Amino acid sequence: MNKEELWQALLAQIQFNISKASFATWFKGTNIISAKDGEIMVSVPNNFSKEWLENKYNKIIFKILHNLDGGVREVKYNVLASHAAAPEIQSAAAVSDNAISSISQLDFPELKVDKETNLNPRYTFDSFIVGPFNELAHAAALAIVRSPGQAYNPLFVYGGVGLGKTHLVQSIGNEIFQKFPEKKIRYMSSEKFTSGIVDSIKNHDIEKFKSFYKNIDLLIIDDIQFLAGKEKTQEEFFHIFNNLYEKNKQIVISSDRPPKAISALEERLRSRFEGGMIADISLPDLETRVAILKAKAQEKKSSFSAEIIEYIATNIQRNIRELEGALNRINAYQKLNNRAPDIETTKMLLKNAIFSPKKIINPEKIVKATAFFFDLKEADLIDVSRKKEIVKPRQVAMYLLRNELKCSFPFIGRKFGGKDHTTAIHAYNKIAKELEKDENLAEEISLIKEQACRL
Ligand code: ADP
Ligand code: MG
């Protein structure tokens, strides 16, 4: 059997093992480039397919190939450049949506998050565009960088989803880190903060937890609205807050709404927040949206016609992350085709982003994507079964429901075969903990998330 026949035989078999959609998504455009000394090199159209094949299908691919040819020892995957530079000009329709999405996902290589501070170096003031919608928050942030702990304390930044809260509060951290390397800085999402507290209570070392925070010079807590209703966490946070505040240590907080509007927030915390500076981020106007798109295009060393930029800026108004997403798609198209799309093509490429801004994931999509990833039936995943191979996938699904959709633990328990909420809490904590040390798991989870978004 030559290498083409070998691959054809594999495709024929694998088709029976996976769904039609997954087959089309992950196996179309694959081939064997070389087969030497038992090492099979498979060409794939892009990095995303490569990751997916390596993480999810490698076992079955290897098994089938090995059955077909006992000499096969190893299978490797390689992104073939010629796939990207397609010889003939393709129409937008001919470029698969998946290829576009997968490339655009890869456009933002996540810089490494600093272990000590938890800050992502990608978020800086340099890349933060200022317009009337965020200038107050921006000015307050700069004042804090100039004199941490002295200008406004705490700084409370609030605004809607995807409007730059995380970017801004992390920029404060990164800039202070540059200017005052001796200062101890800590960025925390409020969920991480909460799970830290829950864990240390469980392990009876809450004092250690608290004393860690005593020594911090700049504490940034992102998305504080998630502390709503968590009384114990709020109480511990209150003590940590007061301790830092009294020592003139800077505290920066973000939220999707002003302190007044966070229900189930202890009154004493609310009044603490209101005692500092409250700055909102509203919606960027058209001019600023255009400026943001231009700056982001430049970051990617791309440029697009004024018409395209304006089309995107006019149609996406409420979320900078979505502006970025649209730009990534156009950019991916350009990379695949070696030319910029015209306006008609742009409209087609952005149809989903613009007309159904609901790319929303829901519990069903998460369950589906998780089952798909682990090659299970959905029913098995949500069933009461205690089969060992189901335990982890189920915990992952529960984790995602909590983390992505903020589902309540009782809801999650019910969803999975009427289990108790403590099972859901246990699953969530377990995965959250493993995520801290297991990079593969983090990768798997982000693949599942991406898949859920596409369903
Ligand atoms: P939020 O935390 O408010 O949901 P993020 O800070 O995560 O929003 O911002 C979403 C995306 O938009 C990020 O990629 C961020 O870099 C980008 N972004 C937000 N605001 C700006 C801005 N003013 N200038 C440039 N990029 C921005
Ligand atoms: Mg955020």
Image (cartoon, rainbow, N blue to C red):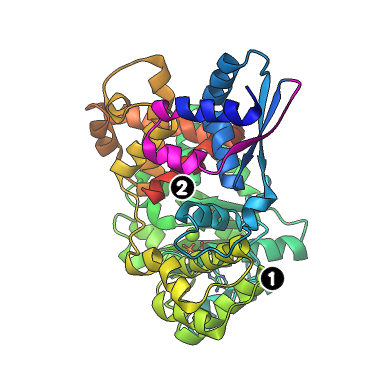
- Depicted 235 relative to depicted 333: above or below: above
Does the image show residue 182?
Answer: yes
Other residues around mark 1 within 10 Å, as few (<14) / some (14–19) / many (≥20): few
* Position in image of residue 73 (x %, y %): 68, 18
Q: Is residue 221 left or right of residue 22?
A: right
Q: Mark 1 — residue?
A: 301
If you read the primary sequence from the N terminus, does the residue marked by circle 1 or circle 2 appear first?
1
Other residues around mark 2 within 10 Å, as few (<14) / some (14–19) / many (≥20): some
User: Is ligand 1 closer than 8 angstroms to the Cβ of mark 1?
Assistant: no
* Position in image of residue 68 (x %, y %): 57, 17
**Amino acid marked by disc 2:** Glu
Does the image show residue 130?
Answer: no
- The magenta segment is 14-37
In the picture, the disc for residue 450 is 2
Q: Secondary structure at mark 2?
A: helix
Q: Is residue 27 left or right of residue 234?
A: right
- Depicted 37 relative to depicted 228: above or below: above
The quarter of the picture where residue 232 lies is top left
Residue drawn at x 47%, y 59% as measured from the top left = 94
